[in-house]
Image (cartoon, rainbow, N blue to C red):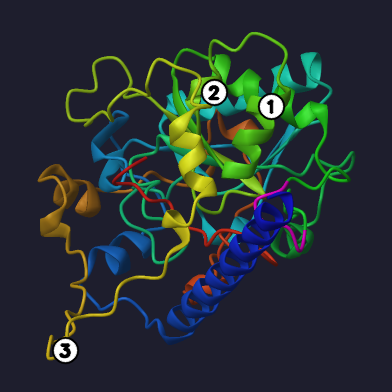
Amino acid sequence: MALHTARTFQTFLKWAFAGVLGASLVAGDVSAEQKQPSPGSAKALFGAVALPNQAAAQPFGFYAKGCMSGAVALPTDGPTWQTMRLSRNRRWGNPAMISLLERLSRDGAKYDGWPGLLVGDISQPRGGPMFNGHASHQIGLDADVWLTPMPAHPMSVEARETLPFTTMLQKGAFLTINPDVWTESRARLLMRAASYPQVERIFVNPAIKKKMCDTWRGDRTNLGKLRPIYGHDSHFHIRIKCPPGAASCKPQAPVPADDGCGKSLAWWFTKEPWAPPKPPKPGTKPVKPREVMVSDLPNACSSVLTAPSVDSVQTATFGGAASAAPEVAPMALVPAAASDEVLPAIGPVPDDKPSGE
């Protein structure tokens, strides 16, 4: 009986590795074939705007279908944070998000043994859909934080562009945390972020969620905010609630009241999430996805897109011009393979899955 069980488990692991690696190869092929967004598409138009508009801060629409007005930039450097991949020009967000990131960086350094945050993508200057890397991050209320601690020295622009990501997953093992990389300080940082009432949810890899379920011995009240999702093995994704009074912001359904360590987590360790898509029926013509246009977004987004810009990055930097750093020329559009959502050596295929989370 024991031998049969062991063989069954080995078969499942082989199947899982094959399925995930196969999916990774498919994802890579798609990235390689991806074209520049069509002129006039929402991705092309919002991605071409270098500065936010002159208006009060306001999110319009949903996290994965919207835009934002009155964005502010997270300063490139702070006492307990550094921003990454500056050429993307994605360190813009609603003031509520920027304020939270600065607070998390301070609290993490003071209470959790985390020297400082490396902050990845937040949003574009006016939000909207991005050419690569994310389906969400469109209304300034999402932000990616690396699971790599901030170094003691200010990094150069080049280093911020090229520093590799560090996966928390163990190579050659299915959804298993690498004990040589994972630390208690990472767990404390995640729970610190989840403790803030304005944080709605935090996306992490299913292996990270399981690790937290199995090992966290502190207050588990906010453990349910950690939501398992594809990818997210080298960073975590913070999503905050619609700010008070933001009538044009479409909220997401609250997370369940439990700790999220039951059936919903167990599902990620079955075959179903990793099964390849079913082939189309014979004779079925493939449906080419239609690019998102500005007209598909909330009505206000057209006005946000064409509104006058602020004078400079410095004037729109959170905390005032003194907090701003020299501007960095934005990079040319590149295929999605260059995004933060890089494929791990083995593990889940990155995907924001905004419809479910």
Magenta residues, start to end: 171-176
State yes or no: discs 1 and 2 in contact (Cβ < 8 Å).
no
Badge 2: few (under 14), some or many (20 or more) residues near its Cα, within 10 Å? Answer: some
Q: Which mark sits nearer the N-terminus, 3 or 2?
A: 2
> Looking at the image, which residue is at 56% across and 37% down?
74
Residue under numbered circle 2: 100
Amino acid carrying mark 3 in the image = Pro
> Looking at the image, which residue is at 53% across and 36% down?
317
For residue 282, the mark is 3
In the image, residue 225 sits, relative to residue 130, either above or below, namely: above
* Residue 270 at x, y percent in the picture: 50, 50
Residue under numbered circle 1: 214
User: Which of the two marks, 1 or 2, is nearer to us in this view?
Assistant: 1
Q: Which mark sits nearer the N-terminus, 3 or 1?
A: 1
Q: Identify the element where label 1 is drawn.
A: helix
| Front-most of residues 169 and 153 | 169
Amino acid carrying mark 2 in the image = Leu
> Looking at the image, which residue is at 50% across and 72% down?
23
| Front-most of residues 117 and 289 | 289
| Front-most of residues 280 and 197 | 280
Quadrant of residue 61 within the rendered picture? top left
* Residue 326 at x, y percent in the picture: 65, 51
> Looking at the image, which residue is at 84% across and 23% down?
113
Quarter of the image with the C terminus is top left
Decide if residue 275 is in sight here: yes
Q: Identify the element where label 2 is drawn.
A: helix
